[in-house]
Amino acid sequence: MNLGQVLGVVVATQKEDSLRSSILYVVQPQDETGRNVGEAVVAADTVGSKVGDQILWVSSREAALAMPETFTPVDAAIVGIVDRVEV
């Protein structure tokens, strides 16, 4: 699992059928201190997050497994909203 922050919404007028009910967000990966690391990714939301939220996200096969239909073509999925991080 990875930490990140939701930066914005991706608007797509055409999507794979299994993504029609999903919101796609631009997510900035972060380290445990909240510093930005790496490049932003597009992630499908599974938990009802919104712009500005700090979130947990997964990638690869785990992202597809987090979706309602497990054969959804996604590379990243938001699987949690962070309340706080204690280091």
Image (cartoon, rainbow, N blue to C red):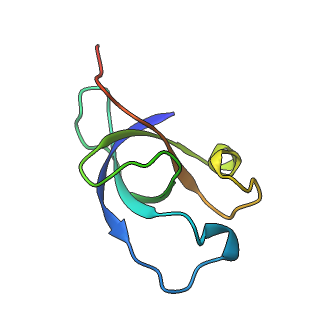
Any part of residue 77 in sight: yes
Q: Which residue of the protein is positioned furthest toward the top in this rendering? A: 87
Identify the residue at horizontal 34%, vertical 66% (top origin). 9
Horizontally, is 25 left or right of 30 in the view?
right
Quadrant containing the C terminus in the rendered view: top left
Q: Position of residue 43 (x, y in %)?
A: 48, 57
Is 46 or 60 nearer to us in this picture?
46
Q: Position of residue 71 (x, y in %)?
A: 77, 59
Give the number of marks. Answer: 0
Question: In the picture shown, does residue 6 fall above or below 24?
Answer: above
Residue 72 in percent (x, y) is at 70, 62
Measuring 46% from the left and 64% from the top, which residue is drawn there? 24
* Residue extending farthest right: 71
Q: Quadrant of residue 30?
A: top left
Q: Nearer the viewer, residue 29 or 77?
A: 77
Q: Is residue 53 left or right of residue 70?
A: left
In-image side of 37 versus 60 (left or right): left
The residue depicted at 25 percent of the width and 43 percent of the height is: 36
Q: Is residue 39 visible?
A: no
* Figure quadrant of residue 53: top left
In depth, the one of 39 and 67 nearer the eye is 67
Q: Give me the residue at 68% from left, 75% from top.
A: 17
